[in-house]
Image (cartoon, coloured by chain):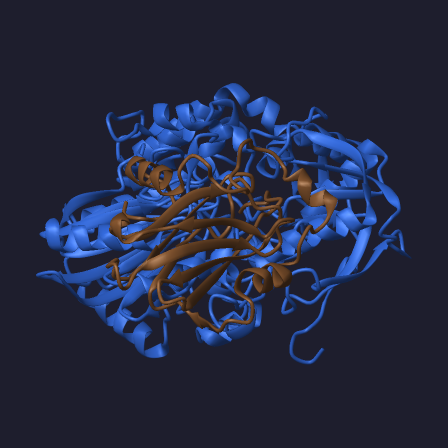
Amino acid sequence: MDVSRRDLLRLLAVAAGAGLAPRSLEAADGPARLLAFEPLGNVTLLHITDAHATLRPVYYREPDSVIGVGAERGRPPFLTGAELLRAYHLSPGTVEAYAYTYLDFATLAARYGRMGGYAHLATLVKRVREERAGRTLLLDGGDTIQGSATALWSRGEDMVRVSNQLGVEVFTPHWEFVYGLDRVKELFGDREQRGVFAGDFVAHNVAELNWAERPFRPYTIRDVGGARVGVIGQAFPYTPVSHPRRFVPDLTFGIQEDGLQALVNELREGKKVDLVVLLSHNGVAVDLKLAGRVHGLDVVLGGHTHDALPQPLLVGKTLVVNSGSHGKFLSRLDLDVQRGRLRGYRYRLIPVLAQDVPADPDMARLIEEIRRPYEAKLGERLAVSETLLYRRGNFNGTFDELILDALLRDADAQIAFSPGFRWGITIVPGQEITPEDAYAHTAVTYPNTWVREMTGSEIHQLMEDVADNLFHPDPYYRQGGDMVRLGGLTYTIDPSKPVGRRIRDLRVAGRAMEPARRYKATGWASLAEVDGPPAWDVVAGHLKSLGRVKLAPRARVRVVGRKGD
Amino acid sequence: MTEDHRISRRTALITLSALGVAAAGGLAAMPGTAWAQALGQNESVEDAMKRLFGGKPMRDGAASVKLDVPLIAENGAVVPISVSVDSPMTPTNYVKHIYVVADKNRIPVVTRVTLSPEAGRAFMGANIRLGESGDVRAIVEQSDGSLLAVKREVKVTVGGCGG
């Protein structure tokens, strides 16, 4: 919520009216202020997404670079840091600056503490459910069961158990599929039967390859606060090209405007719903385009690109929400829905500040039970970092540099590749790094490393291909990851150029990369089957040998083509 | 699911009947990388267009021609494509041919489908092979000889690195 002085006074008045002493709202910039929410209407949608199996509170630094191309540039959601604060009338040094931006991250992390954690999230959800009995719907946009050691070892089951405990009611997938279709069906059921998950798993754009039969239900209809709410599931459209094909060999995905429009019409005309929600794993730029081309969507609850949007973006009459990642936020969207029409809304991207929200005892017990067998193994001290380590951002983060160093050393290679995943927690200066943290950056079902020779021109082409997946002027052609991370190599990139012309001045160890020359390259998370040691072992081994991590700033990527260049 | 880019059972049957068994070159027989690309361009798309249509004017078909093909191919060796044209199919006014052209393919002309008024509707669907990222065009030749064209960029990506 964009809290202006006026809003704040209103909130204080509301709190006073509700019998709360103003003192309980703490100082005007105190975190508790963000928990006060003046209810509106008859429907409260609660949305979480992209938790990446982050069971306990963590630090997660929002990106310093999210570059939009063409008309997108410099507008939400392509804003970071000070620009984002300005756009939403927020101030540096506040809890919002900590939650929504990368600014002063280490300092603010020390002040406001870790964020997220299912036990803290559960408390917030319970509070809203008590306050809005019969009027809430809790939706999860997916990428929930991948990203931790315990999720990997239980093949997603631990996260489905906590999702049930949290009371997630509707779910749509992406990374869930890296456990294979059979496992997804065991955990989430299919259109015929239920799985372990107690809610509804919906995915309209997933079909069997040959005959276009949908294995999952495309939508669900729920009665919320006297309104009939239709929720259509939009799984990540590019699942088969973003992960090894072997996990979903017989499924097809994609962006299907016609199919979606037909479902919206069916819900509105055939099923007489009052509100149509798209629970989406498209990524925010795709959501915005889709909302402008499919008519009749009231709300898009989006994820995938991990954008923490302080306010919904309005496309025509459609509200587009994106709720960040790693359990950092709970989106609350109050809606006034009357006879098939959305008459008003109020929203906040609520930061889950672990030190200000007590843990829910039941959830805390379940998490402890899940972790107990592995606690000692995961908590071992590998190294201590003096540097702020993070991954998120369009280009190499400091944790990526650490992974790349580990890969280069292990393979004795000249160039290393690491995927531009948007998940992966942050380590603050002075913090111990544990195997759990190494897994939080590498826990995939295709973790193996590889070593092979590649020509300079192959490397360049691969980089251009990935850059086009990030900076294609049409969001429908983007896959939603960040730029592939490179070690041993520096380059210049102009995101505004067309494919094949974005990247230049590639240098290997300071010398111009030669197109025909062969370089020894390494990497992990290959789409092909490879058999090198898994990335977590390589990273953990490197950390252990370092003992202390201290990374000097590295001039890795020069970004040009923006204003002032 | 109506005429999205996946091929339903019914559509597949229609397609088979439309194409006959002698489906033109470019239909994917087996998955895998299109190694033929490595041999180099057999014919440029410009030459192919000149050969097929001479200098005949081509109108933008966006209003009546629907080209359905994934924006990012899930497998470049088997890319489902369909073309439907909002057109009468009467003996005096019908869609005669639908061409599919993949600009970057070694042999850009992927197929030409011949239709007759008896087909009832102007539609074709097929699985095609794309050697690399580039434009895919659908060119519609009407019974009076006039031409309509639409195109769409299709990426054949190395993939990976999803968020």
Which residue corresponds to the image point at 63% horizontal and 40% vertical from the top-left?
A: B34
Residue drawn where x is 43% and y is 43% of the image: B126
Please name the residue shown 74% across and 49% down the image. A486
Asked whether, in this view, residue A236 is left or right of residue A407, the answer is left
Q: Colour of chain A?
A: blue
Q: Which residue shows up at 32% across the image and 36% down it? A: B13
Q: Is residue B120 left or right of residue A83?
A: left
Q: Dividing the image into 4 quarters, which one contains the C terminus of chain A?
A: bottom right
Which image quadrant for residue A511?
A: bottom right
Which quadrant would residue A358 be assigned to in this image? top left
Residue A499 in percent (x, y) is at: 65, 61
Residue A408 versus residue A160 in the image, above or below: below
Q: Does residue A263 lie above or below A559 as drawn?
A: above
- Letter of the chain in brown: B
Q: Nearer the viewer, residue B92 or A449?
A: B92
> Relative to B75, does residue B40 appear above or below in the rendering?
below
Q: Percent from the top left, x then y, of residue A540? A: 71, 31
Up the image or down, A198 lies above or below B71; here it is: above
* Residue B107 in picture, x, y percent from top left: 62, 49
Question: What x and y, as percent, mark residue A188?
Answer: 33, 30
Res. A55 visible in picture? no
Horizontal side of A164 relative to B102 (left or right) equals left
Of all residues, the one furthest to the top in this rendering is A373
Query: Image check: A262 left or right of A90?
Result: left
